[in-house]
Amino acid sequence: MPKQIISASEMERFGYCPLSWYLDLEGIDAEGDEVHSGVEKHKEMGDSLKSLLVEEEKSRETSTTLMTVVAMIMTLVTLALVILLISSDQLRQNLGFILLIIGIGWMLVASFFLYRLLVSTEKVDKLREDYKLGETDIETPDGLTKETPLLKSIEHNLAGRPDYLIKEDEMRIPVEVKTGRRPRAPFFSHVLQIGAYCLLSEETFQRKPAHGQIRYGFDNEPHDVKWDSDLRALVLEKLEDMNDILKGKTEAHRNHKRVGKCNSCSRRKGCPERLDK
Ligand code: SF4
């Protein structure tokens, strides 16, 4: 099989059923309305998070420009007032008035930047509220910051892009957002996927994240998944299984006897091992 790099989302598929993952590699696409609506919702969220980061960057730049303009106005006005107060010379008095008028002109420029800053801050606040992000410092892997390219591990033949990363000093906590109802405990396949992101985050940023986070929608409390030695061992074990299949050492098969699982599987139509009712 030509494909070499395994992605974290493939690990999710493998965690659901190894055969589902293998069928996808063989070109059997997932079917069903939920698949399409899930992809749409994910895209919408990705776009919103990107625009949040763009707005935050814009807001920072506007704020810096505004500060510079205000400092300039203060300098001009102070200079003008000093000249007007201490000088009786007509020429200097005129210069004082000119500086004062220039200062007032720059106040209009400052008002424009202030307006832009307010609009930008309002957009940022709304997006942060929509995504229940609070004051969390986040990054997306889409390259707004150079520190977060596609996360890759040569050693483990793994790559992936979590939906976003929470920045805590040097540590990056990967976050994966899932559509659908929040379960009491996260699904095994989702835990495997977030484990893969934790492994990638640890290798990329050289700092072990304390946990990964799975969010089932933004209105619910997220699940924190501890990144400990057990989860690490599980991720490495499944990666080895997947690599063995890719190398042709073993084959992918259904690993369960749950009819319900096959009934909900988006690849059941093209699956030779599906269980029927
Ligand atoms: S139909 Fe069942 S056996 Fe086939 S891929 Fe889906 S879950 Fe696995």
Image (cartoon, grey):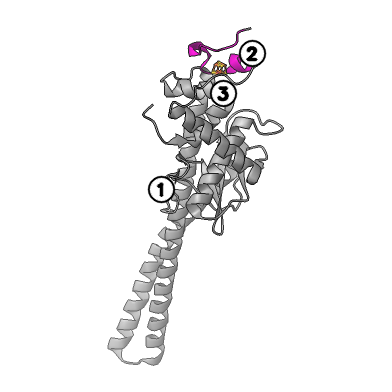
Q: Quadrant of residue 213?
A: top right
Residue 179 belongs to the span the image colors magenta: no
Q: CA distance from mark 2 to mark 3?
A: 12 Å
Q: Residue 232: image x %, image y %? A: 60, 43
Residue 17 visible in the picture: yes
Q: Name which residue lies at 44% across and 18% down.
A: 28
In the orientation shown, which residue stands out farthest toward the top?
277
Circle nearer the N terminus (3, 1): 3
- Mark 3 Cα shell of 10 Å, populated few (<14), some (14-19), many (≥20): many
Q: Residue 93: image x %, image y %? A: 33, 86
**Badge 3 is on which residue?**
17
At label 1, which amino acid type do we have? Answer: Gly
At label 3, which amino acid type do we have? Answer: Cys
Q: Residue 136: image x %, image y %? A: 58, 52
Q: Name which residue lies at 57% across and 19% down.
A: 254
Q: CA distance from mark 3 to mark 1?
A: 32 Å
**Residue bounds of the magenta highlight:** 261-276
